Image (cartoon, helix red, strand yellow):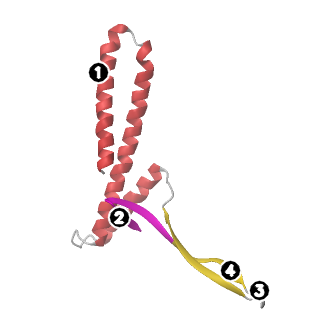
């Protein structure tokens, strides 16, 4: 289930059923105890999660191909598309951060004649990283 809270959507699970039992002290009779709780989706491998989202979007669109782009099914597709954009932005930002760290580690071993090119690469990667993280925050 999707829970929209302050502009963010959270994937939740509802759990219900038997959570235990109580025993009457005098008769020994057992009585089941029922309950429920709500949990957040556990973290998933991003690649696996991406595949699940793409499959769900495809299924929703196929099942509603003759319907207007409105209503709960369409809202769910839009929510999933935002999640997909966030996963892609995180993957891209992670890759860019690794590239930045690699470049930073090379700083002291680069010959003087290559410093200008190195600085240019750093500026470009930092700009791309900032754009990606802004995209992630907006998604």
Q: Earlier in the sequence, mark 3 or mark 2?
A: 2
Instruction: Spot the residue most to the bottom.
Output: 27
- What's the CA distance linking mark 1 and mark 4? 67 Å
Name the quadrant containing residue 125.
top left
Q: Which residue is mark 4?
A: 21
Q: Which mark is residue 120?
A: 1
- Residue furthest to the left in view is 68
Question: What is the C-alpha distance between the residues marked 4 and 3?
Answer: 13 Å
Cα distance, mark 4 to mark 2?
35 Å
* Residue 33 magenta-highlighted: no
Asked whether the viewer can see residue 16, the reply is: no
Q: CA distance from mark 1 to mark 2?
A: 42 Å
Crowding at label 1, few (<14), some or many (≥20) Cα neighbours within 10 Å? few
Mark with earlier residue (1, 4)? 4
Q: Which residue is mark 3?
A: 25
Quadrant in the rendering for residue 65? bottom left
Prevailing SS of the magenta stretch: strand
Q: Tell which tag, 3 or 2, sits nearer the viewer.
A: 3
Residue 102's image quarter? top left
Tell me where the magenta segment starts and ends, as one range. Answer: 1-14
Q: Which residue is mark 2?
A: 4
The location of residue 29, given as percent across then percent down, is 74, 89
Where is 83 relative to 132, above or below?
A: below
Nearer mark to the viewer, of 4 and 3: 3
Disc with the residue nearer the chain's start (1 vs 3) = 3
| Figure quadrant of the N terminus | bottom left
């Amino acid at each position: 289930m999707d829970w929209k809270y302050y502009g963010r959507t959270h994937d939740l699970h509802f759990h219900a059923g038997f959570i235990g039992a109580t025993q009457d002290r005098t008769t020994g009779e057992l009585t089941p105890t029922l309950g429920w709780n709500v949990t957040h989706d556990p973290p998933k491998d991003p690649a696996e999660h991406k595949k699940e989202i793409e499959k769900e979007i495809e299924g929703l669109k196929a099942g509603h191909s003759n319907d207007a782009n409105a209503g709960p099914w369409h809202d769910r597709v839009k929510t999933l598309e935002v999640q997909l954009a966030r996963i892609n932005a995180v993957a891209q930002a992670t890759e860019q951060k690794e590239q930045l760290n690699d470049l930073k580690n090379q700083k002291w071993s680069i010959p003087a004649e290559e410093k200008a090119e190195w600085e240019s690469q750093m500026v470009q990667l930092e700009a791309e990283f900032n754009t990606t993280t802004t995209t992630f925050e907006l998604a």
